[in-house]
Amino acid sequence: MSLLPHQLELLSPARDADIGMAAIDHGADAVYIGGPAFGARATAGNDIRSLERLIAHAHRFHSRIFITLNTILRDDELEDARRMAWQVYEAGADALIIQDMGLLEIDLPPIQLHASTQTDIRTPEKARFLQDAGLSQIVLARELDLQQIAAIRAATDPERCTIEYFVHGALCVAYSGQCFISHAHTGRSANRGDCNQACRLPYEVLDGQGRILAHEKHVLSMKDNNQSDNLRALIDAGVRSFKIEGRYKDLGYVKNITAHYRQLLDAIIEEREFSDAPLARASSGRTEFSFTPDPDQNFNREFTDYFVNGRQQDIGAFDTPKTPGRAIGWVSQVGEDWLELELSDPATVLHNGDGLCYWDLQKELVGVHINRAEGLQGQQGRWRVSPKDPIASFKDLRKGLEINRNRDMDWLRQLAKKSSDRRIGLWAELGETADGFALTLTDEDGCVGQAHITQPHQSASDPQRAQASLREQLGRFGSSIFALHDIHLGLSQPWFVPASALNALRRDALAALEAARATGLQRLPRAVPVQPPVPFPEDTLSYLANVFNHKAHDFYVKHGVKVIAAAYESKEEEGEVSLMITKHCVRYSLSLCPKQAKGVIGVKGTIKAEPLQLINGKEKLTLRFDCKPCEMHVVGRMKKSVLNQHARQMAEQPLQFYRTRPLA
């Protein structure tokens, strides 16, 4: 079991331990972070000492730390992966997030296992299988709608397996784990944490007759995911862990987006407090913020809720993979080395260092870095801006042009400072003992800490003042992680107790409470796989299954698979294959889908789902359309340079990995 069925988990990303600690401070119930190696973000690794620091901080709030070990592994890497798994377990990590099923066949520690997004969970059958194979938490494909999510929840056991879902952040256009274009073109593998982001490049789209349907458009680049408006529906569909994307993101992003979803989830928990199915946070404490969370303030490609409410046309960021920001006004005048702006909201303030941008006539985003910003005296909402670069360098800059702001320096400065206060509620009771006094602290989780001092029972000369002093001295929890709800003075009379004695009593009781909380935090249990091993939903696996080592092969054999192809990284697929499989459809986005034409007089029957071609420089890819499941395949082949580079590597230092035929 991972979460209890009524608990909601806010799961935040962290590039490093400091960002992870900030995520906890801003309300995260759990944080996922890379370990020393084998994470799906190759440059976001962390050493054991840093992880220990983060884990200790998180556990004070009964928050959890999940370590990503979610790349596919060669045979010669399995032993290092095993050692790393034991290291993070001994450091106190709560779970491993994995992709490679070969890990289930080696000597892992008794740590809980979660299925990575790279395991590509789209069906109830796949979800049920992974649950029965011993995975306690599974993150579903981002392309699923509410009905599909609910069907997976119905097919799995909420007591054994938690449903996790991405609610915010960048979207990979391909189903996770089903993108091989980076490896085909560069030798760098997304399934091994090293993607070259070909999906963010501009392409020409050509039809079968060579006609240009789109010119220099980023047709594989998606807007950013934002499920803020769908949280209640996702909860009702069975989601219990709400995941924020972004292990490469900066501190400000993690603070802001964590705080944003913390507030939204807390509001839902509060509104359902007295319902038939009340909800609860998965960790301890309440968080207050010194800023108003706003997802628009961070880098984003504009937002979409993707397929949660069904297919929509406007999900792509086709004009630019950059952040366009938020419209703030218009250019009212252009000078020799300045421009004047009229802001739509007179209360908006510009700052030196702000980033502005606008769309030129070719629909390209042009950035304007403010060197100096001055409000025009007596003209509210009008500003004179001196850019860092010469005015002549700004293409199509003119009067009447709409201006966006995509970097607000004042906002960034707020987020660079301490911006949250997370505290665990507690109740205090002071009682008399035969030789002194005892202080009992009970927190919101029922953990208890008690301390005793030997102190004469000395009558107070001013009982009212003595009682107030007792409450004041015992109520000083400001430097701790606790917030006092109430103090009960269980005394026969208001005694005089020196402030120094009360401070020592409070400190000792706090230390005892922290120790009780540490003792009370149980390790998440490792799920026991169903015996005998349940059959995998398919008996034949292609390269799409990402089997890169013999232990993974053995895992699938044990689960009834008869034919097992090697992973794409094994270099056995030298012809044209699907390098991406996507729910996003370029035809649909360009209004060239046969289903869109159905019933339209004069158009019906004239549009066919014929292949299209993508061109970026010398790179050529074919788009093929599988209309029954409503999917698109980006088809291409592995470059000879990648194959040659691999041959040289194998000659210099042979690597061990799963193949179905001898290496040429």
Image (cartoon, helix red, strand yellow):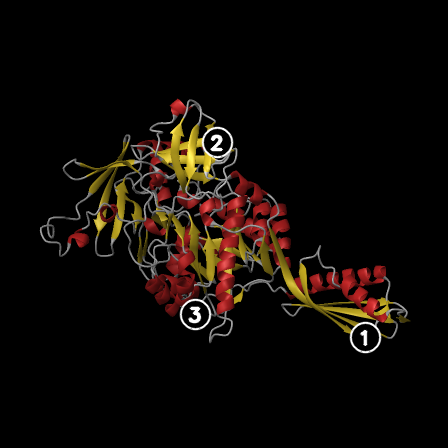
Question: Mark 3: which amino acid?
Answer: Asp
The extreme left residue here reads 602
Query: Dot 1: within a 10 Å radius of its alpha carbon, few (fewer than 14), some, or many (20 or more) residues?
Result: some
Residue located 13% across and 54% down the image? 600
Local SS, label 3: loop
Q: Secondary structure at mark 1?
A: loop
Please determine whether, in this image, residue 663 is positioned above or below residue 91: above
Callout 1–callout 2 Cβ contact below 8 Å? no
Q: CA distance from mark 2 to mark 3?
A: 55 Å
Q: Which residue is mark 1?
A: 491
Residue drawn at 84 percent across, 75 percent down: 493
Residue receiving disc 3: 157
Q: CA distance from mark 1 to mark 2?
A: 65 Å
Answer above or below: position of 493 versus 379: below
Image quarter in which the C terminus is found: top left
Residue 477 numbered tag: none
* Residue 255 place in picture, x, y as percent: 54, 49
347, above or below 640, in the image:
below
